[in-house]
Image (cartoon, coloured by chain):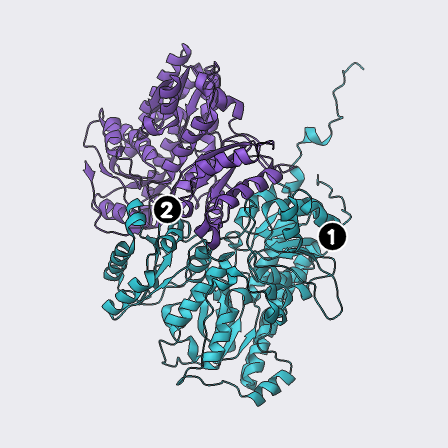
Chain colours: A cyan, B purple
């Protein structure tokens, strides 16, 4: 009893026109530039508009600057006390609602992630100012926990009434002496999406925390992992793999992280960037100030994991490390391959759509490819053009008013601690061997011709898209989950992983193959029609007939 | 006894949500409605994801997506553009506009903006646009919920056209509770307009064909006729009539108001059935009389397990009052009734529902967070906790006692939208849950592990 999905004549141009049809002309013109049909152009990728304001009344998937700052970047750090300065809602909604995991099992490990601290501003604070209340809240947090650091996050009203949260933070830091206090001007109305919040968060971590601890940590082949948030334990699996290869992870920004990790990040010898969108500027700043080069990695997909490990080994040019990496890959791949083959028999040829994040819509295409599934359409929620088209477009990005509102730190080499980890000659020789630094080619070149690339997809377009293509699976977040499933298509959450994971690394890949197999081959969709609806012409007859 | 703790200035682990969330939920219960938050887009996104993960249903909330520029110059143009875009794509019958911290702080007057919008686009086939002021710097999600319902009756109800349908304002209850209320009225042969009614919109079936606005909800024509209803029933002991929809219909249109507690437990449900008998002139239908009988029978059977157990109750004020009424009548001793709400009426409500029960009334904490609740609970040696998921880690797990999950949000158990709380049937479901939680705990704690309890 399976419902037959009729093969749809997939003409992307027609589908795009259909999506734009019901918009008012001005909205249609704007959306037109954010919906792109991927074409193979000679030596070029087609241009998309991204990182522009959401149109009012369009039910966007995007969150706000506060969500990006407090929820995404600082959320996974366990030993910083995070205080939301504002009315109660924002703090409440970001109270352990992302599945960023942490391991605070060590002796003396503090974990404040499970708390939700807020100044819970009331009318009188809006009228007379909330600085005093904030100061008291910081004092209370200090007295209660004596944490290494306290971070303050501004919600919309704070910027509007002009509370100087940075002055309060500075005053309290000086008063305590043994607790770093810093604040984030991450009011929700700033920027066009949570991406602005990532930037504000990372800037402040770079300014107030990185470089605070010079002590060199033990261990060989020291790297930082930038832009990995340990959703569903991804970071744990990556750390397991790194450790087995003998690679030392100094700091993850910011999955399963601690204050001290950030503080000593400048002592690492290589930065590995996972999520290009949320953190590429930190990699650049670490290079300029401390001389640490960076490479793009991806641990989503077994093949991509192996490739990334080899990239790291290539950088360090150490035969022992290369040997360990190869040994690990050889050890892990048979299980992955067995699971892949088994699942591929049932998933091969099926189709997927991905609308998530600033890098996941790209990275997860790797996993789908491994089990023979084709990506029909993909797009980011909050990415910029360089995440679609590659870093080569960065010099040509238009700086609009919204981007100008987000601070760009001007970084100079640190007079004492700047130390280039590799010189120009070595860089050239590494590049000659195929290692590329500071590079990300973006998602679009990896996608097939005729696929639809859509920025900031909204509820209405998602539905049109699913109706037109009837993909075998759709990936986005919880907000999209149930509307897509009401259309009879399974929907996998790639923000929170639907309480699953990890999906990174080798073991993660196996988890993902099995999860997708479970979802795309579920029989439940075949039961949507009741038996009496299946054959409506069936009617009763008299027995004597 | 009311204690005002406030040892701390800051709020740690809040026991309340914000106003606009309540308004958005209430608008979900009107047929063809799209909730619209006037503010930064993050509010709509945060609330959508929060509501969705409780109900496991699609929830579309639009936003005027104000940016820095609009925060300075005002959000009017965005609000108007946003409503037009919602109209184009969703063709809603109602757009429910609720304000947020951002727009309240800059002083956007949503009522005026909506009036302007209606005048500016009078040539279009406009939906009903309702606006409500819901700044989160004060009150909780419940104030937002009730304010939205009151705004709907204030702005939509026009001419008192006589109708036989009685108005029912249930407050924030589960979709399953709403379905049960409908069934009760049906059995009384009583036509009823329940506002809001999200029993289908927030707990719908699988579909072959997705609808942009889910089916169900209180129909607009029925809301328009509310002024001509023979009576209104409104649940919520802490709800002030001067801030409620039932109060408005009474003072403005003379609709007789029955103000009742949330019908949780035997006695509060008896009050509802008494009111229904009075309104309809019919006796309680037999199947409900039988349900009442079965409930009492269970009370008798389960008393040996529960007698003397001590409970901590938290959540929205009216839910807390209802649960306290229920627990106190089954032999459980409510030792602490706490809420993040601050209506100022919880203490009195608790005293009223516990008045006829022997023993000391529970300690009541209003306007508190979980930090305060836990601090007080520790000294009270509770055996069980009843409330939403947010009290699991900080309270139940911390004290090593079971949590019976009720209300909103329930994010760590399945089937939150189908939880029963109201009526004799709801009381029985709660009673089974409480007894079984106590049995499970004693079984788990036993060194032997008896399977015969």
Query: Against B104, is A367 above or below?
Result: below
**Residue A12 badge:** 1
Chain designation of label 2: B
The 10 Å Cα crowd at callout 1, few under 14, some 14 to 19, many 20 or more, is many
Quarter where residue B313 is shown: top left
User: Residue B104's x, y, as percent?
Assistant: 39, 44
Residue A228 left/right relative to A460:
left
- Find numbered disc 1 in the image and state the secondary structure of the residue it sits on: helix
Residue A277 left/right relative to B369:
right
**Residue A446 badge:** none
The foreground one among B408 and A200 is: A200
Chain designation of label 1: A
Residue name at image x 26 percent, y 45 percent = B373
Residue A418 visible in the picture:
yes
Residue name at image x 45 percent, y 36 percent = B112
Query: Against B284, is A294 above or below?
Result: below
Q: Residue furthest bottom?
A: A425
The foreground one among B396 and A14 is: A14
Image quarter in which the C terminus of chain A is found:
top right
User: Residue A523's x, y, as percent?
Assistant: 65, 43
Please give the residue where the numbered disc 2 appears in the rendered image.
Answer: B390
User: Residue A311's x, y, as percent?
Assistant: 59, 77
Mark 2–mark 1 CB contact (< 8 Å): no
How many angstroms separate mark 2 from mark 1 (CA)? 46 Å
How many discs mark residues in the rendered view? 2
Query: Against B29, is A170 above or below?
Result: below
Residue name at image x 57 percent, y 71 percent = A297
Residue B63 visible in the picture:
no
- Find numbered disc 2 in the image and state the secondary structure of the residue it sits on: loop
Q: Residue furthest top?
A: B281
The foreground one among A403 and B202 is: A403
Image quarter in which the N terminus of chain A is found:
top right
């Amino acid at each position: 009893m399976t419902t037959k999905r009729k093969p749809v004549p997939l003409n992307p141009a027609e589908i795009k026109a259909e999506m734009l049809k019901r918009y008012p002309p001005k909205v249609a013109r704007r959306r037109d530039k954010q919906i792109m049909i991927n074409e193979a152009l000679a030596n070029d990728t087609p241009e998309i508009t991204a990182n522009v304001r959401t149109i009012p009344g369009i039910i966007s998937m995007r969150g706000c600057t506060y969500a990006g700052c407090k929820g995404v970047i600082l959320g996974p750090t366990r030993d910083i006390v995070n205080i939301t300065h504002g009315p109660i809602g924002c703090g409440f909604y970001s109270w352990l609602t992302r599945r960023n995991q942490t391991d605070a099992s060590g002796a003396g490990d503090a974990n404040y992630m499970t708390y939700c601290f807020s100044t819970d501003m009331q009318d009188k604070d809006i009228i007379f100012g909330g600085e005093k209340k904030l100061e008291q809240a910081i004092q209370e947090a200090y007295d209660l926990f004596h944490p290494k650091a306290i971070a303050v996050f501004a919600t919309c009203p704070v910027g509007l009434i002009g509370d100087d949260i940075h002055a309060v933070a500075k005053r309290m830091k000086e008063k305590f002496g043994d607790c770093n206090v810093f604040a984030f001007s991450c009011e929700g109305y700033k920027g066009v999406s949570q991406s602005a919040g990532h930037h504000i968060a990372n800037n402040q971590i770079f300014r107030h925390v990185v470089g605070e601890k010079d002590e060199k940590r033990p261990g060989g082949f020291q790297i930082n992992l930038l832009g990995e948030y340990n959703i569903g334990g991804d970071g744990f699996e990556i750390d397991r793999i790194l450790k087995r290869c003998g690679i030392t992870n100094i700091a993850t920004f910011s999955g399963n992280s601690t204050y001290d990790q950030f503080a000593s990040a400048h002592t690492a010898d290589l930065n590995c960037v996972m999520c290009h969108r949320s953190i590429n500027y930190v990699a650049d700043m670490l290079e300029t100030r401390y001389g640490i080069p960076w490479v793009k990695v991806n641990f989503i997909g077994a093949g991509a994991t192996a490739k990334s490990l080899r990239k790291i080994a290539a950088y360090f040019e150490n035969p022992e490390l290369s040997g360990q990496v190869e040994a690990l890959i050889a050890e892990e791949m048979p299980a992955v391959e067995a699971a892949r083959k088994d699942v591929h028999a049932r998933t091969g040829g099926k189709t997927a759509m991905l609308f998530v994040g600033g890098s996941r819509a790209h990275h997860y295409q790797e996993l789908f490819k491994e089990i023979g599934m084709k990506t029909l359409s993909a797009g980011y929620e909050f990415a910029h053009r360089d995440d679609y088209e590659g870093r080569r477009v960065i010099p040509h990005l238009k700086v609009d008013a919204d981007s100008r509102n987000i601070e760009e730190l001007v970084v100079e080499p640190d007079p004492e601690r700047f130390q280039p980890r590799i010189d120009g000659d070595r860089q050239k020789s590494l590049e000659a061997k195929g290692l590329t630094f500071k590079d990300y080619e973006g998602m679009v070149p990896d996608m097939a011709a005729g696929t639809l690339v859509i920025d900031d997809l909204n509820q209405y377009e998602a539905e049109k898209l699913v109706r037109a293509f009837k993909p075998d699976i759709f990936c986005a977040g919880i907000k999209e989950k149930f509307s897509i499933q009401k259309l009879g298509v399974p929907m996998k959450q790639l923000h929170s992983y639907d309480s699953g994971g990890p999906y990174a690394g080798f073991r993660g890949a196996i988890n993902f193959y099995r999860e997708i197999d479970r979802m795309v081959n579920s029989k439940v969709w075949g039961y949507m029609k009741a038996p009496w609806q299946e054959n409506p012409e069936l009617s009763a007859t008299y027995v004597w007939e | 006894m009311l204690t005002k703790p406030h040892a701390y200035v800051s709020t740690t682990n809040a026991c309340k949500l914000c106003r606009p969330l309540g308004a958005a939920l209430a608008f979900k219960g009107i047929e063809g409605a799209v909730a619209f938050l006037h503010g930064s887009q993050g509010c709509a996104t945060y609330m959508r994801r929060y509501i969705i993960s409780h109900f496991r249903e699609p929830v579309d909330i639009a936003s005027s997506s104000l940016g820095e520029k609009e925060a300075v110059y005002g959000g009017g143009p965005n609000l108007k553009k946003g409503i037009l875009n919602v109209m184009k794509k969703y063709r809603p019958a109602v757009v429910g506009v609720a304000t947020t911290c951002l727009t309240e702080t800059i002083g956007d007057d949503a009522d005026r903006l909506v009036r302007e919008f209606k005048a500016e686009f009078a040539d279009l086939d406009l939906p009903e646009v309702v606006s409500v002021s819901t700044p989160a710097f004060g009150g909780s999600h419940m104030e937002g919920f009730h304010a939205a319902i009151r705004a709907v009756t204030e702005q939509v109800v026009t001419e008192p056209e006589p109708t036989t349908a009685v108005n029912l304002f249930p407050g924030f209850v589960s979709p399953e509770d709403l379905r049960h209320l409908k069934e009760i009225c049906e059995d009384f042969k009583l036509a009823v307009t329940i506002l809001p009614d999200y029993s289908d919109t927030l707990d719908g079936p699988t579909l072959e064909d997705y609808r942009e606005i889910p089916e169900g909800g209180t129909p607009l024509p029925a809301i328009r006729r509310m002024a001509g209803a023979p009576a209104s029933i409104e649940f919520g002991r802490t709800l002030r009539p001067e801030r409620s929809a039932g109060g408005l219909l009474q003072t403005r249109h003379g609709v007789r108001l029955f103000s009742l507690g949330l019908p949780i437990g035997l006695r509060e449900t008896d009050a509802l059935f008494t009111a229904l008998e009075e309104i309809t002139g019919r006796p309680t239908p037999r199947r409900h009389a039988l349900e009442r009988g079965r409930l009492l029978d269970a009370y008798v059977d389960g008393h040996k397990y529960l007698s003397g157990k001590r409970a901590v109750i938290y959540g929205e004020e009216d839910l807390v009052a209802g649960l306290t009424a229920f627990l106190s009548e089954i032999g459980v001793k409510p030792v602490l009734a706490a809420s993040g709400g601050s209506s100022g009426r919880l203490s009195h409500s608790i005293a009223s529902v516990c008045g006829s029960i022997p023993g000391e009334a529970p300690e009541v904490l209003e306007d508190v967070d979980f930090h305060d609740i836990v601090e007080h609970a520790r000294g009270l040696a509770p055996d069980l906790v009843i409330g939403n998921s947010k009290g699991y880690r900080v309270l139940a797990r911390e004290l090593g006692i079971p949590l019976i999950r009720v209300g909103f949000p329930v994010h760590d158990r399945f089937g939150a939208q189908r939880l029963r709380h109201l009526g004799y049937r709801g009381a029985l479901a709660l009673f089974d849950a409480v007894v079984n939680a106590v049995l499970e705990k004693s079984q788990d704690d036993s060194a032997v592990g008896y399977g015969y309890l």
